[in-house]
Image (spheres, rainbow, N blue to C red):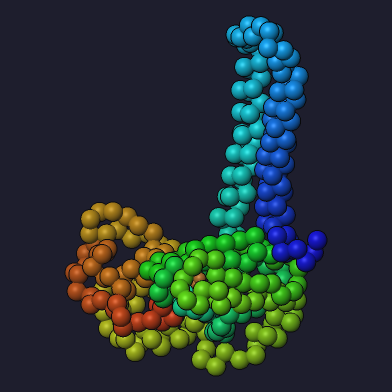
Amino acid sequence: MGSFPLFPEEASTIAGQTDALYFFLIGVSAFFSLLIAGLVIYFAVKYRRRSDTEPAPEPATGGTTLEIVWSVIPLGISMVIFVWGSSVFFKINRPPDDALEVWVVAKQWMWELQHLEGQREINELHIPLGRAVRLKMTSEDVIHSFYVPAFRVKQDVLPGRYTQLWFHPTKPGRYHLFCAEYCGTKHSGMIGWVYVMAPQDYEVWLSGGAGEGTLATRGDKLFQDLACGNCHKADGSGRGPSLEGILGQTVELETGQKIKVDDDYLRESILSPQAKIVKGYQPVMPTFQGLVTEDQLLQLIEYIKSTGKKK
Ligand code: CUA
């Protein structure tokens, strides 16, 4: 059965739970399909008309007990499916806070993976065993979908926004990575491998060179190259708000609305600065749409994030 591709191995904490729910659904469906099909045949034979002169039977009416039974049992079963299904759903959608973060930029037709330490991989992802991993993903062109069957996780990757996906690998090994959303001619070739390594091997791999520095230091350099600091002065005296440690904080907008600063807000403010103006500032920032790449955007975000950690 191991080579039968319908059942890839279970290699993440969520895989067993997803499979258990899946097999429960299959079991319930199979049980009732067989039960109903069997009863249809059994009753068709048992109550067949035995001769042309046999009178038609009286039609049955009512049967309160029966009606209650066939309402309450399905209700019970569907509530079990609902509660069980939503508990797995919430687990899949709530990454733990201490997860290792990796950025994913999808493009026709490859996966680019960026570690915070600076390593950049194409169609390969190296991660340590025993730690949850959270991917923050975006696309440079069309919709793709990041799919690792052995982890039982799949998430669409959309242009213009960040989606996330997390998993906690439970076995070292090499696992298939697929694009699961048709994205053009070479969609079928948009595949790769996820390598789950022993933590010490991962450390060795990680130290194997990130020539250009961490994402945050590259973002720092870019911040200077683009002269962002001319307006976004750290002490708040500039024409734009200070960005020091702003990630995760709540800011009040011109409209009076209060929002929490996250990756998506930073991204939007770089590409469409007029969209959400912080209270007390003028809408003077030019757009950087077309001037910064997806890779540079996430470097800037990591830099802004790092200014909060220093303190
Ligand atoms: Cu990318 Cu299919």
Residue 281 x, y percent position in the rendering = 21, 68
Q: Which one is in front, 246 or 5?
A: 5
Q: Considering depth in this image, is 30 or 138 the residue closer to the camera?
A: 30
Q: Residue furthest front?
A: 52
From the viewer's perspective, is residue 78 above or below residue 281?
above
- The foreground one among 8 and 293 is 8
Front-most of residues 158 and 296: 158
Residue drawn at x 57%, y 50% is: 90
Residue extending farthest right: 1
Name the residue: 70% across, 52% down. Answer: 19
Q: Tell whether 256 sits left or right of 147.
A: left
Quarter-of-image position of residue 63: top right
Q: Is residue 268 above or below residue 113?
A: above
Q: Looking at the picture, how far across and down is residue 72, in whole percent?
A: 63, 23
Q: Quadrant of residue 27?
A: top right
Q: Quadrant of the N terminus?
A: bottom right
Q: Where is residue 219 shown, x and y percent of the image?
A: 43, 83
Residue 246, above or below 24: below
Q: Quadrant of residue 264?
A: bottom left
Is there any visible trace of residue 307 in the rendered image? no
Tell me the residue at 26%/73% (across/down): 240
Q: Position of residue 47 (x, y in %)?
A: 72, 17
Say which residue appears at 38% left-offset and 81% top-offset. Answer: 293
Q: How many marks?
A: 0
In the drawing, does residue 41 fall left or right of residue 167?
right
The answer to whether residue 38 of the structure is visible from this angle is yes
